[in-house]
Image: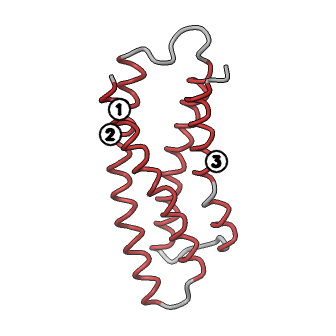
């Protein structure tokens, strides 16, 4: 079980590195006016999105293995796990929202300001903080 936990943590950390960086690239794309720089940022964003998508798969699978295979979070007093799983669904949704926003930039259709992207950039920090607190503190 410790091997699975270790792998889960490594893949989560790697996935979140992408979730922290890709929105920052989107902030820069929203501000950029030069075509060459925009194309370079789009290339970086596409490669990062593909890579973090690959990292998300083992992160989710190892998490499911822990939850289903070892009974983590089952039984009374484990309401924290239900909230954590809901937040994980939000993380997956955020990941897909990043991909959707990237596609809009690729198509030349951005309707958001760089300020909006700066706020959007903070979402994974809040999600990770809440998830870690739930897992470590287990408040309910």
Q: Residue 43 location in percent, x, y?
A: 37, 74
Q: Is residue 53 above or below residue 10?
A: below
Q: Residue 52 location in percent, x, y?
A: 38, 54
Decide which of 13, 106 is in the foreground and name it. Answer: 13
Q: Is residue 92 above or below residue 102?
A: above
The local secondary structure at tag 1 comes to: helix
Q: Residues within 10 Å of mark 3 (few under 14, many from 20)?
A: few
C-alpha gap between disc 2 and disc 3: 22 Å
The reply to whether dot 2 and dot 3 touch (C-beta < 8 Å) is no
The reply to whether dot 2 and dot 1 touch (C-beta < 8 Å) is yes
C-alpha gap between disc 2 and disc 1: 6 Å
Q: Residue at label 3?
A: 126
- Looking at the figure, which quarter contains the C terminus? top right
Q: Residue at label 2?
A: 58
The picture quadrant where one finds residue 138 is top right
Q: Which residue is depicted at the point 50% across and 13% down? A: 74
Counting residues from the start of the chain, the first of labels 3 and 1 encountered is 1
Q: Which residue is depicted at the point 63% across and 66% down? A: 117
Q: Residue 80 location in percent, x, y?
A: 61, 23
Q: Residue at label 1?
A: 62
Counting residues from the start of the chain, the first of labels 2 and 3 encountered is 2
Q: Which residue is depicted at the point 61% across and 43% down? A: 129
């Amino acid at each position: 079980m410790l091997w699975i936990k270790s792998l889960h943590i490594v893949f989560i950390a790697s996935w979140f590195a992408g979730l922290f960086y890709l929105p920052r690239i989107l902030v820069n794309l929203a501000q950029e006016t030069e075509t060459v720089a925009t194309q370079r940022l789009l290339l970086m964003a596409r490669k990062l999105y593909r890579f973090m998508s690959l990292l998300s798969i083992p992160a989710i699978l190892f998490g499911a293995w822990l939850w289903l295979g070892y009974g983590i979070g089952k039984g009374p007093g484990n309401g924290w796990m239900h909230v954590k799983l809901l937040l994980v669904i939000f993380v997956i949704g955020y990941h897909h929202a990043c991909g959707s926003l990237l596609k809009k930039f690729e198509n030349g259709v951005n309707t958001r300001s760089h300020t909006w992207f700066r706020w959007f950039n903070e979402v994974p920090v809040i999600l990770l903080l809440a998830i870690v607190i739930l897992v470590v503190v287990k408040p309910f």
